[in-house]
Amino acid sequence: MPESLPENAVVRVSRVTFDPDLYDEVTVVDGKTAQYLIPAIQQLPGLLHWFAGVSAEGSFVQISVWDSEEHAVQMDRLTEMAVIARGEFREVGVEFTPEHASIVNYPITWTI
């Protein structure tokens, strides 16, 4: 049975590509940033689910489900994410330019 979600729920997909040679460094930074991102994100209203993953092929994603667009966009202003974590990823060579990074909030139209 599909999970019951609020009518205005959105899924937020953040994807960043990087040189696959940086995989080990990116994985380490991903684990390090999780230590402070998890408690910061958990304090935001409207979070329903959060998933993160790093691929050896040279990309990482953060996928979250929010009860509304209003709550999803909080991530744009979360200092721990927008400033601190991005800075740590930049230190190992990850770029956050439009060619390498995208963030899109999608209204959820159906689920399984």
Image (spheres, rainbow, N blue to C red):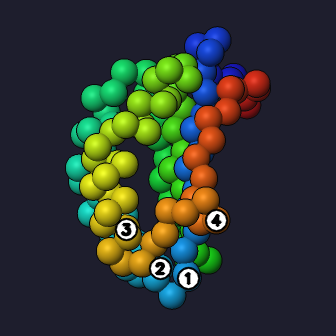
Q: Amino acid at mark 4?
A: Glu
Is residue 43 shown left or right of residue 47? left
Please identify, in this view, whether the residue under mark 2 or under mark 4 is nearer the observer. Answer: 4
Q: Amino acid at mark 1?
A: Pro
- 37 sits to left or right of 72: left
Q: Identity of the amino acid at label 2?
A: Tyr
What residue does disc 3 label?
89
Q: Secondary structure at mark 2?
A: helix
Bin the neighbour count of mark 1 within 10 Å (Cα to Cα): few under 14, some 14-19, many 20 and up. few
Q: CA distance from mark 4 to mark 3?
A: 16 Å
Identify the disc placed on residue 99. 4
Which residue position holds label 2? Answer: 23
Which labelled disc corresponds to residue 94? none
Contact (CB < 8 A) between labels 1 and 2? yes
Dot 2 crowding, Cα within 10 Å, few <14, some 14–19, many 20+ = some
Q: Which residue is pictured at 55% across the width and 63% down the height?
A: 97
Q: Residue at x 32, y 63 (%)?
A: 87
> Residue 66: x, y in percent?
51, 27
Residue 103 image point, x, y percent: 58, 46
Q: Rounded to the nearest whole Å, what is the CA distance between mark 2 and mark 4?
A: 18 Å
Q: What numbered label is drawn on residue 20?
A: 1
Position of 83 with respect to 23 (left or right) is left
